[in-house]
Image: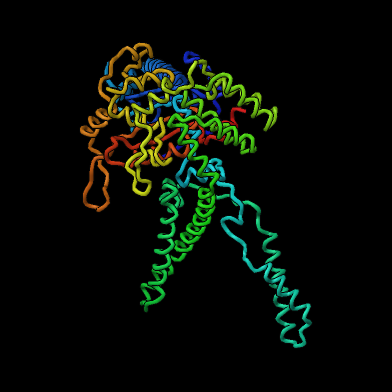
Amino acid sequence: MKIQTISCGGSLSGANDNPNDNDNPNDKDAGGDTGGGGGYIPRIQSFGKMSESVLKRCYELRREDYYDMCIMSNSSDDVSASGNTNNIHDTNPKNGTVPPGGDIQAMMILDRRIDLVTPMITPLTYEGLLDDVLSIQSGILHVKTDIIDPPEEDEDGGDNNINDAESSKSHSSSKASSLSKKKKQLDKNKKKKKDRPLYTLLPLNDQDTLYVEVRDQHVEKFGSFLQEQAKALKESHANFSNKDKDLTEIHMFVKQIPIFTQNLKSLTTHIHLAELIKHTTIQSEFRQRWQIERSIVESESCFDVIEDLIASQYNVWRVLRLLCLHSLTNGGIKTNKLDALKREVVQTYGYEFVFLLQNLESIGLLRKKDTLWDTASSSSFVTMRKHLQLIQADVDPLDPDDVSYVSSGFAPISARIIQTAMKGWSGKEEALKEIPGRGIDVVQKYPPEEYSTALKRTIGAPLGVWAKQFKMNDNRTTDIGDGTNSRKKKPVLLVYFIGGITYAEIAALRFMSKRNSFPFSIICCTTKIINGTSFLQSLA
């Protein structure tokens, strides 16, 4: 699955709530022209206010381009009369038909506001935890050099040996010579350590084949996977070293030495990173936080635990994530309780958080609930949790069959919306009503029509049926691995997140795209890759 980000910011504080406002620059950059160089995208769905704003702008841009083409066509009529019969309309479909589309057959535009819960949840995939623990910036991991390349553990021992030697005042010249060598080696090691950069920039992308394999694996799996890779690499080298080889085999081995060296370096790096993540995840503090999150999404009250965390001056961004998660999943927090919690946050962490708390309320991450009973039964999240089956406690993280493995049993709402759109919303209308904004489903026609006209048309078939119809009429095939058999290619679905996407959601989309039962291959595009902490910091 391909991922593209334009890195135009992950904050919702600057997003315009008015879906009729076409002057939002982020909308133009995000939406673009749905009839660009890759061909028209015939089927488009959007969820959320900002997504509808982008979709409407796409329609306007396409109509503007159409009229520009008409003007160019009319101006070329004089040229046609003089002998050039080429006309711009010769390559366009007939009026009133659906454009055939290019490489992308469908698009889903998702507003971050339709799923504010997932960023607050701790991811449990390798890539997600790297971002949560160390923070990945634009595909680059800024990591301390000592983590991925630990220094030699002989400096301290060397000092002690030298001091012992000096105190004993060895009488033999051989011992004096040995002492001199040890001093030189110690000075060399100290100089090497001094010259080492404090941080290393580690790119995380598809060029690292090992990273591609391990990035979406669950925390319970990637440790043993890396150990198996190390064992296989060691056995591969041993098999060659322990046997007599002819010149041809030796030549082939020598040619593979650079690849072997690169694989060994990559494996060593990821083993050290995995050890750091494992050390973090086995801590009682991490496990307690995960248990609190799970209790909250299951509608249990955790105010006492959160108040204890505040009193102990726990990481403020972790505390705010838990507060926002509690508000989002319970339809808000009672006014008296929310005011008390906000007061404790300000008194404990500083008055600079006053403005952030106000922004969280204006965005909807924190909301007051003026009801007599503190219950979550009427919460929109509870309705979606039930109808979209967000919690799958029995998912196997080692051999998952559901996207909920990315956080050990909780499926991202955005991923569930995409899955449901494939089969249609029949029987899940209650969940659809709870999604902020309205769901839009349109098919582009030729010539381009008004956005309001497209909304009046009933589509009928869900996206999954649309994909099957495309495959029946498409002759393109792809090799399935044995070099002799092939099968029809899946149509491509472009999923665009406005307001940012998390690594947990990326892992869920990759999981869906790889499965034969999912009708599309997914390309993901987003304004920014975020996590819960960076998302809240962008609102400060």
- Apparent side of residue 306 relative to residue 176 in the rendered image (left or right): left
Query: Can I make out residue 72 in this image?
Result: no
Residue drawn 62% across the image and 62% down it = 151
Q: Residue furthest bottom?
A: 172
Query: Can I make out residue 361 in this image?
Result: yes
The answer to which image quadrant residue 509 occupies is top left
The answer to which image quadrant residue 394 occupies is top left
Q: Position of residue 478 (x, y in %)?
A: 27, 44
Compared to residue 471, the image places residue 369 above or below, namely above
Compared to residue 443, the image places residue 516 above or below, namely below
Q: Position of residue 304 (x, y in %)?
A: 56, 32
- Apparent side of residue 425 relative to residue 331 in the rendered image (left or right): left
Q: Nearer the viewer, residue 51 or 74?
A: 51
Residue drawn 65% across the image and 37% down it = 313
Compared to residue 366, the image places residue 130 above or below, namely below
Q: Nearer the viewer, residue 373 or 13?
A: 373
What's the coloring here? rainbow
Q: Nearer the viewer, residue 518 or 20?
A: 518
- Screen quadrant of the N terminus: top left
Q: Position of residue 61 (x, y in %)?
A: 43, 19
Q: Position of residue 110 (x, y in %)?
A: 42, 26
- Screen quadrant of the C terminus: top right
Count of numbered tags: 0
